[in-house]
Image (tube, rainbow, N blue to C red):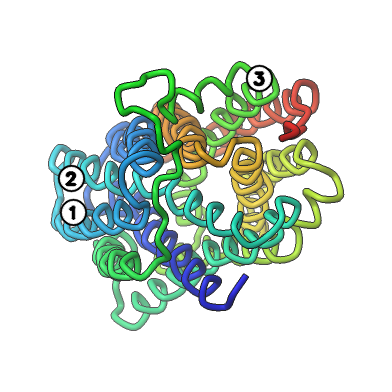
Amino acid sequence: MSWSLYLLLSAMMFLQFAVWGAWMPVMAPRLLGPLKMTGKQTGWIFATLPLACIFAPLIAGQVADKYLNTEWVLAAAHGLGAILLFVASKQVRFWPMFVVMFLYSCCYAATLPLVNSLMFYHLGQVVSPEAIAVESGKIFIMAPIAWALVGYFLTGWRQLTKTEGGAADGFVLAGLLSLMMAALCVFLPATPPVAAAGQQVGDFGDMPIIKALMLLKEFDFLVFVLISMVVAGMMQFYFMGTGAFMQDIGISGRNVSGLMGIAQAAQAVATLFALGPMTDAIGYKWTLVIGAGCWLLLYAAYVFSPQRALVILAQAFHGVAYVTFLIAGQIFAGQFAPVEIGGSVQALIFAATTGVGLFLGTQLAGIVMDRCMVEGRFQWKQVWTVPMAIMAVSVLGLIIAFQGTLPVR
């Protein structure tokens, strides 16, 4: 892989996740804090991205696989998304915030599978299939680095300006980063549709997304998608609850973003040193088991050892889990799929995990948080017991039912 290709793909991955990392970790403290929204209302606003991920990635993957260059789809989506983020920073009531965040989420959700498919497409031109996990890890590492640096920057900015947790500055920062991403996309390597040249637009059976859905006939792939959906859903407890949980156990709201950035630091280390060697040494099955197991350990720490130092250290489990479950799963899906439907298969994974999984997880987390509130205070042990139990069942399901073998092509 040439340095120019590496730098462009790395910058793309960095900005893609810097945008997300600027607003996601600090949105719940804003909604639950100064805006005084309920757990259910917070859950619905968090649900905008999962809802959008149910259909937007599928549409974007279809467009990129058949009609338009991937880099142009990315540029348009991020440009419009930047405008919507600036608008979101001004909203203080539930319904306007919900509508704006849903429109933004449709834009951002469309980009999530496309950065992966663009990366896998160009890596496939220059490295062997066996080297994909290692080479993609060198690019995926920019995602946690971006998320961590954005978190540390926002924490430093708040310390410098004496801004309390719950401010709208995260949305403004995300909008600026989204504009930068839109500009970068113009310079990404050309990534044209790779569907068969003679394929007719109206041929339903030959649509890339239909071919991607047909992969679900493979039992192992079906198990992978279903369990990924459940595991991803449990992440919403982490995102919706951790910020408020930290503040309730005595951590300053100014420091929440930076401390949650420990997860991204751990993610960066795991991406660089563990992802490729682990999948090579123990295969995708046990890599995914370890990933889900790390989330199980995180929630167990929240339930049984809710001390400040341990909660802060436990953030590392989230980072390792993200790499060894979600990213490893995306690489598994990329190698499982034929190249001509790579965008649509990545879209299917995002629709199942970041879409259906996170949506259902958001609703469950919102309901649990509301029901576990007594006199205005969350009963955190009860809240965290729910994702801990579901994650334990998911780990067991992976061990029993998933094999993780790739088809021979």
Q: Is residue 14 visible?
A: yes
Residue 178: percent from left, percent from top: 29, 63
Comes first in the chain, label 1 or label 2: 1
Q: Is residue 172 above or below residue 289?
A: below
Of circles 3 and 2, which is in front?
3
Measured as percent of width and height from the top left, residue 55 is found at: 34, 31
Q: CA distance from mark 1 to mark 3?
A: 40 Å
Residue 351 in which image quadrant? top left
- Among all residues in the image, which is located at the extreme bottom? 160
Residue named by callout 1: 84
Please name the amino acid that badge 2 sits on: Val
Rendered location of residue 159, percent (x, y): 37, 78
Q: Nearer the viewer, mark 1 or mark 3?
A: 3
Q: Give the residue displayed 78% in from the left and 48% down from the top.
A: 279
**Nearer the N terminus, badge 1 or badge 3?**
1
Residue at image point 43% right, 18% down: 205
* Residue 100: mark: 2
Q: Is residue 376 visible?
A: no
Instruction: Tell me, yes or no, whether the two marked residues, 1 and 2, touch with CB atoms within 8 Å.
Output: yes
- Quarter location, residue 138: bottom right
**From mark 3 to mark 2, how far is it between C-alphas?**
38 Å
Residue 313 locus on image (x, y percent): 66, 60
